[in-house]
Amino acid sequence: MRTSALIAVSAGTAAALTLAGCGDSKDDATTPGAAGTSKIAVTATDTECKVEKTETTSGPVTFTISNKGAKVTEFYVYATGDRIMGEVENVAPGLSRELIVELPAGTYETACKPGMSGKGIRGGFKATGDAKPLTDDAKLAQATQDYQRYVKSQTGALIDKTTEFVTAVKGGDIEKAKTLFPIARTYWERIEPVAESFGDLDPAIDAREADLEAGQEWTGFHKIEKDLWVTKDVSKSGPTADKLLADVKTIVDKANTVQLSPLNLANGAKELLDEVATGKITGEEDTFSHTDLWDFAANLEGSRAAIAALRPVIEEKDAALAKTLEDKFAAAQAELDKHRNGDGWKFHNELSEADLKALADSINALAEPISKVAPLVASK
Amino acid sequence: MDRRKMLGLAGAGAIGAAAAGVAGATLIDGATHPAQAADAGAAIPFYGEHQAGIVTPAQDRLHFVAFDVITDKKAELLDLLEKWTMAAARMTAGRDAGSIGAVNGTQEAAPDDTGEAIGLPPSGLTLTIGFGATLFRTAEGKDRFGIADRRPAALADLPRFAKDTLKPEISGGDICIQACAHDPQVAVHAVRNLARIGFGVVSVRWTQLGFGRTSSTSRGQVTARNLFGFKDGTANLKAEDTQLLKEQLWVQQGDGAEWMTGGSYVVTRKIRMLIETWDRTSLGEQEAIIGRSKGEGAPHGGKAEFDLPKFDAKGADGEPLIAADAHVRLSHPDANDGARLLRRGYNFVDGSDGLGRLDAGLFFIAYQRDPRKQFVPVQTRLSRQDTLNEYIRHVSSGLFACPPGIRAADDYWGRALFA
Ligand code: HEM
């Protein structure tokens, strides 16, 4: 490994140069022995943790830790979420100790802890081997079922509210249609990632004026939004309204028959927050009505529902992450709740820059841990 | 993972160059040529008595960031400082920000490094952290982390100086990190990854890119130029001035807050330069304003750049050769009770200003032992008398306490402060 060599040079230990490239080398000590264990040397100092090889075959692995530093050290192998796979404590300066761990195929972290405190000097580690096919995990199957039930309940309400909205538009009742607009969209926004997977229907329902190419026909919610708030004339909006309802019905049928995977849930939860970060915080989603906060709230609820379905799985594999997600969802919701107005929300253009920054911060705080759910779900 | 692993054999040569660079850095003195090109790729040790990025020979590029801490939970902040320290140790060594790396993780996971530095050498990256006054007590008077009594007296709010036109939204901040490197991509990569690791605990308040150093902080470097076209850094405090560094740069035992011993205070000032009017000013006038020649950088009355200025020398007309209001006279230690600064600024051009002018200037950075005795008196004088003021506007300001260096991996940024 080139970097370890570099550090060695700056630390003045020329001998370490011989380790250059060892990350990829196949020297005798590191190939699996007769007993089927790989042996890996770890050289620890007070500022470095040189793991001779960062990839091995799955199965039992023997790490030999030599402490060349001045402080007592420890060595750990962690799986996702800092789950300890194995550790040796109290390696005194000048001494060597062995650690044997059984590592299934996957990615891990190694850590030396000079002074026996802190998070240690981490390094990536990979065990490769025959990845067992994704077993039909009962908890995951349950999670998917729970979420699909949620999608079903939302799509039901989506059809109902869209029907009411469309009726108001066609009846020329502008005020009523304006009130129903953000409400109908709420059910849409909660399950948008599922809906979005049906390529051409999503734009037909949800395209914004700015999304259109030259000559492309504009249909869907936002076309009617413009009619309601800008043109203030819905006398010609009937056909658009009818098409909207028809498209919504088609997408609902599809959404309720598609078989989701647990990864869809995890990624959907993240995508909903991405929607918030890119569209709602900026006020780009509902440029005419400024009802972005309704969509914001719906995205957040939808994301939370997907994570709630996965909760038992997350809890089992990484309890700390489960806790973090709970806290950060609560924090984001509290930030949003500051902008409640009656049954609904303030308009986007009523929020200050500082309000928007606080909202953006809370979403960023939530989205990073959420991005860890998909790999966790995929890990065995 | 090592982001240069994929470079294969090319690495072997680079190791040689790196070795030469490291050796060179200590051997070079003012008389020889700087080894800038040779060691531009090498790593600068992260661990040490003082933080790197202060007396480190000023690298070519800067990405400076100031954060607001958005949590009230001390444990969350400490956890972040620990994670940051690990990531900083990795990135300054030319590794990925996270231990898995940009492309080595599973397909399902977002990588723990953003990847734009894959294949790039460490590039002399240094990451230097500082703590602002609002970390100790917020503007609203809240002591969020129980450290209000640890705020060093030297971290006193800067006074308002004459002609200040500061924008609060690009000033101050609870924590700053200065990322300097010879490759701008490496500096940006570092800040981006630290900001990402910080989500939920800190929020980026403002950042500044600097495309070229204006200063030199060691005698081995050529003096660079600022956007007024003058050599900048000639009379700077330099890495080789060991005794002066003790007196003027590093906080000493007994100075006050114990956790700062071995640290330093940094002042940042974003100074917009009105380059269009400056460029219409005659050479003679420009040189008079600075007090040095534009070409050589010699003080008036001297011949070579490093000739010492003679402030009492007079011309045939009986007027001082270095004008009474020349920048170098006003800012010189003689005029300021011996106070010196280690200047480490960068040129910036932040696009244009909509009025057909470049939004350009100097992102001034100065390190010192006590701003109350150094930056504040110097800037007070400059803000009142410096003719340069006609051509510049101070638009942002920051003051941060930069703790001493990290000596071993069980330590982390801010540990002594919060202990
Ligand atoms: C855009 C604004 C500025 C420009 C263009 C500028 C330019 C220069 C130049 C060309 C020199 C002479 C070369 C050298 O010794 O480095 C110099 C020296 C110096 N400047 Fe500035 N400067 C600026 C702002 C400041 C500020 C804000 C301070 C501190 C408050 C400052 C402090 C100094 C000091 C201490 C010296 C060295 C004086 C000596 O000991 O001879 N400068 N500056």
Image (cartoon, coloured by chain):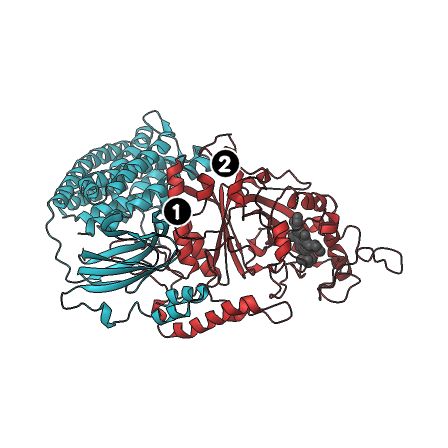
Q: Name the side, left or right, on which A216 lies relative to B329.
A: left
**Subunit bearing disc 2:** B
- Upstream in the sequence, badge 1 or badge 2? 1
Q: Which residue is mark 1?
A: B82
Q: Name the side, left or right, on which B295 lies relative to A303.
A: right
Q: What's under tag 2, amino acid-wise?
A: Phe
**Is residue A122 among the parts visible in the rendering?**
yes
What's the residue at 10%, 50% (across, down)? A136
* Residue A47 image point, x, y percent: 40, 56
- Element type at marker 2? helix
Q: Which chain is cyan?
A: A
Q: Quadrant of ligand 1?
A: bottom right
Q: Which residue is mark 2?
A: B136
Judging depth in this view, the residue of A137 and A116 nearest the camera is A116
* Residue B148 image point, x, y percent: 50, 33
Which image quarter is the N terminus of chain A in? bottom left
Judging depth in this view, the residue of B320 and A331 nearest the camera is B320
Q: Name the side, left or right, on which A124 lies relative to B50.
A: left
* Residue A323 image point, x, y percent: 27, 38
What's the residue at 28%, 63% (across, down)? A41
Same chain for mark 1 and mark 2? The answer is yes
Give chain B's shade: red
Q: What's under tag 1, amino acid-wise?
A: Glu
What's the residue at 85%, 58% (across, down)? B314
* Residue A122 image point, x, y percent: 33, 54
